[in-house]
Structures are given as structure tokens and as C-alpha cells.
Image (cartoon, rainbow, N blue to C red):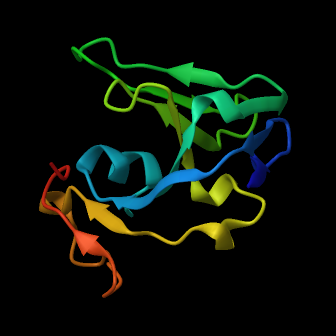
């Protein structure tokens, strides 16, 4: 599968060759901050197949956490591109909204529903977990 995407202002462009490893919603409180209140719609891709074709994203990593994630975003328009996390080494967690064709997103699970807000929607066919599934 070939995927392409980028930021709102087109300063960052990426491509991916490979299969989508997972498609999910994350309802954790941290993702709510990053999205502006909603769950994070994400796909998990193999880092080996992911590359930036144009531009260089800025990154942010919290210094007060033992195992922080690294968040990548466009330094011009601020669009969040994705994340690399110690919980998934060798992967790039990409925000679905940055895909040129977001219709490829078919969420299978919702995680961290312990933090779910009343206005969040989980489709009936999506398996939900209070935290990360074992």
C-alpha cells in the first residue's frame, strides 16, 4: 500500500510504503489536549516505510516524563503530523487528518476510554478498552 500526506500549508509532505499495522482511536487525556478535545484518529505504520518527501518537521518531547513520546508537527502551520512512542518502537503513529486519502482509516479499536468524554463517539463495530489492550 502507498500512502501520502502532509500538513495544511503543504510545507511538510510524507510518503509511506507498506501495510497499516493498526488503526485506532485514542481517547487518553493527552490526546484530547493535542486534538483540541476529541479522540486522536491514528494509523500505526512501520517506520522503515515512512519518509518525509518535503520539509522537516519540528518536534516536541516532554522533559518531565520517564518515557516521553516525540510529537512531530509543521513549524509553519502547526499541523500535528504524528508521533514516535517508546511503546511502539520502529513505528510512526500518523494522524489520519494528514493523509491525502483519509478514507483508508477503518478504526478497529478505541483505547483509553477511561478518559472518554460524553461527546466522543465510538462506532458500534469498534472494540473499546479502558486502557491499552494486553
Residue 40 visible in rendering: no
Q: Position of residue 102 (x, y in %)?
A: 67, 67
* In front of the other: 120 or 78: 120
Question: Is 97 positioned to the left or the right of 6 in the image?
Answer: left
For the N terminus, which image quadrant? bottom right
Q: Position of residue 33 (x, y in %)?
A: 36, 47
Whether 63 is drawn above or below 117: the answer is above
Residue at 32% x, 78% y: name it. 122
Residue at 29% x, 59% y: name it. 27
Q: Choose top left, top right, bottom left or bottom right for residue 78.
A: top right
* In front of the other: 53 or 16: 16
Whether 111 is drawn above or below 87: the answer is below
* In front of the other: 122 or 11: 122
Whether 2 is drawn above or below 65: the answer is below
Question: Is 76 positioned to the left or the right of 81 in the image?
Answer: right
Question: Is 5 positioned to the left or the right of 85 in the image?
Answer: right
Q: Position of residue 6 (x, y in %)?
A: 76, 45
Amino acid at each position: 500500500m502507498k500512502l501520502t500526506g502532509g500538513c495544511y500549508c503543504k510545507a511538510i509532505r510524507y510518503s509511506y510504503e507498506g501495510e497499516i499495522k493498526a488503526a485506532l482511536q485514542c481517547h487518553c487525556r493527552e490526546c484530547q489536549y493535542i486534538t483540541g478535545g476529541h479522540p486522536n484518529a491514528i494509523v500505526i505504520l512501520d517506520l522503515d516505510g515512512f519518509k518525509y518527501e518535503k520539509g522537516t518537521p519540528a518536534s516536541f518531547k516532554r522533559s518531565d516524563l520517564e518515557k516521553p513520546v516525540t510529537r512531530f508537527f509543521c513549524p509553519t502551520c502547526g499541523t500535528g503530523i504524528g508521533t514516535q512512542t517508546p511503546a511502539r518502537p520502529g513505528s510512526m503513529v500518523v494522524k489520519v487528518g494528514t493523509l491525502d486519502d483519509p478514507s483508508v482509516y477503518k478504526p478497529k479499536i478505541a483505547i483509553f476510554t477511561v478518559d472518554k468524554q460524553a461527546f466522543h463517539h465510538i462506532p458500534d463495530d469498534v472494540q473499546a478498552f479502558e486502557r491499552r489492550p494486553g
